[in-house]
Image (cartoon, helix red, strand yellow):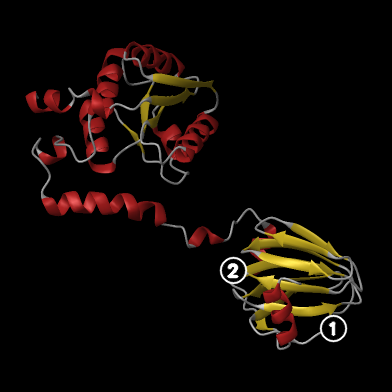
């Protein structure tokens, strides 16, 4: 254990701030560990006691928001230490681990760069928890640990650990592009959009009739020449960035993700797409589109800044 003590002796690896919370089964242990952290002059933000899923999620959310600040970590306690860790790990950049021994803490820090420690209020004594916490605080990423027989990691494994820190946050990113809690995103997921023949770069899929709604996509750089409709329409940008010039009213709207715009019936408007853009649009009646200029004129006016 001499190597363990040596590895844990440097206070340089300790975080500057710990965000902590617990459920009712872990509250007493959490409070004891807070006292220990304060004795080490480490700043503590105590979120108190609540249901394990809510406090785990909140600590995870805050550590995730501070991901670029390696000086901020999280500490959670519940009955087993498992539930709080599961919910903390829902957030990108959070690597929460339930540690029941100092060996667990050493391995979690060395191999996984664990930034949220979860402990068990039902099976871990205060003295043992303090030892676990100290090991977790003082062990650097890729340090010798029980899993390496307390020897330095070989170069190939050290490189693998480094790459894992970049690759793990990407896992599931493509699958989560569409938020399953959003009914609009669920409508468009896996649907094939049909090209808009009148405007290069555009495609559309009708998802409901009367009132009519659709998902529309435009490629970056696309332009909608000045045009008008016999109906007013509401739209919400789901992805990307665009500008809409309402020429009838002399107004310009710069729209990004989550922005809403209503364009009244008959208003002549021109649109420019700066990124690949997707939006939800709704209107009453049948689709129509009357052009008030050609595409080249529209591009010229936008380039001149007179749109």
Dot 1 falls on a residue whose secondary structure is loop
User: Which is in the foreground here, disc 1 or disc 2?
Assistant: 1
Would you say the residues marked 1 and 2 are in contact, meaning their CB atoms lie under 8 Å apart? no
Q: Which image quarter is the C terminus in?
A: bottom right
Q: CA distance from mark 1 to mark 2?
A: 24 Å
The 10 Å Cα crowd at callout 1, few under 14, some 14 to 19, many 20 or more, is some
Kindly identify the residue that appears in the image at 12 percent across and 40 percent down. 148
Residue 76, position in %: x, y? 42, 27
Residue to which mark 2 is pinned: 275
Vertical order, 185 against 285 (above or below): above
Dot 2 falls on a residue whose secondary structure is loop
Tell whether 192 sits left or right of 131: right
Towards the viewer: 250 or 100: 250
Vertical order, 160 against 31 (above or below): below
Residue 13, position in %: x, y? 26, 29
Towards the viewer: 207 or 229: 229
Q: Disc number at residue 15? A: none
Kindly identify the residue that appears in the image at 63 percent across and 81 percent down. 201
Towards the viewer: 94 or 207: 94
Residue to which mark 1 is pinned: 292
Kindly identify the residue that appears in the image at 64 percent across and 64 percent down. 241
Q: Which image quarter is the N terminus in?
A: top left
Instruction: Choose top left, top right, bottom left or bottom right for residue 189.
Output: bottom right
Choose the circle earlier in sequence order: 1 or 2.
2
Residue 116, position in %: x, y? 38, 33
């Amino acid at each position: 254990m001499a190597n363990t003590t040596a590895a844990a002796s440097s206070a340089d690896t300790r975080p500057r701030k710990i965000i902590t919370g617990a459920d009712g089964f872990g509250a007493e242990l959490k409070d004891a560990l807070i006292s220990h952290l304060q004795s080490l002059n480490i700043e503590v933000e105590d979120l108190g006691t609540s249901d394990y899923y809510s406090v785990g999620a909140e600590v995870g959310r805050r550590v995730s928001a501070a991901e670029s600040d390696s000086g901020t970590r999280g500490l959670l306690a519940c009955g087993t230490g498992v539930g709080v860790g599961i919910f903390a790990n829902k957030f990108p950049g959070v690597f929460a681990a339930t540690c029941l021994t100092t060996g667990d803490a050493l391995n979690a820090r060395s191999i996984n760069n664990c930034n949220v420690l979860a402990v068990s209020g039902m099976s871990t004594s205060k003295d043992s928890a303090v030892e676990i916490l100290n090991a977790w605080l003082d062990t650097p990423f890729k340090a010798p640990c029980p899993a390496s027989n307390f020897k330095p990691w070989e170069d190939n494994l050290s490189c693998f650990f480094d790459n894992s820190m970049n690759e793990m946050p990407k896992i599931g990113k493509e699958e989560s592009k569409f938020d399953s809690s959003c009914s609009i995103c669920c409508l468009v997921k896996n649907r094939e959009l049909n090209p808009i023949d009148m405007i290069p770069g555009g495609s559309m899929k009708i998802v409901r009739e009367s009132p009519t709604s659709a998902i529309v996509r435009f490629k970056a750089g696309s332009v909608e020449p000045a045009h008008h409709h016999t109906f007013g329409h509401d739209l919400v940008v789901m992805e990307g960035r665009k500008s809409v010039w309402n020429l009838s009213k002399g107004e310009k709207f710069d729209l990004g993700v989550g922005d809403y715009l209503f364009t009244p019936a008959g208003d002549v408007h021109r649109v420019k797409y700066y990124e690949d853009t997707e939006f939800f649009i709704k209107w009453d009646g049948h689709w129509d589109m009357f052009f008030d200029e050609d595409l080249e004129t529209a591009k010229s006016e936008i380039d001149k800044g007179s749109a």
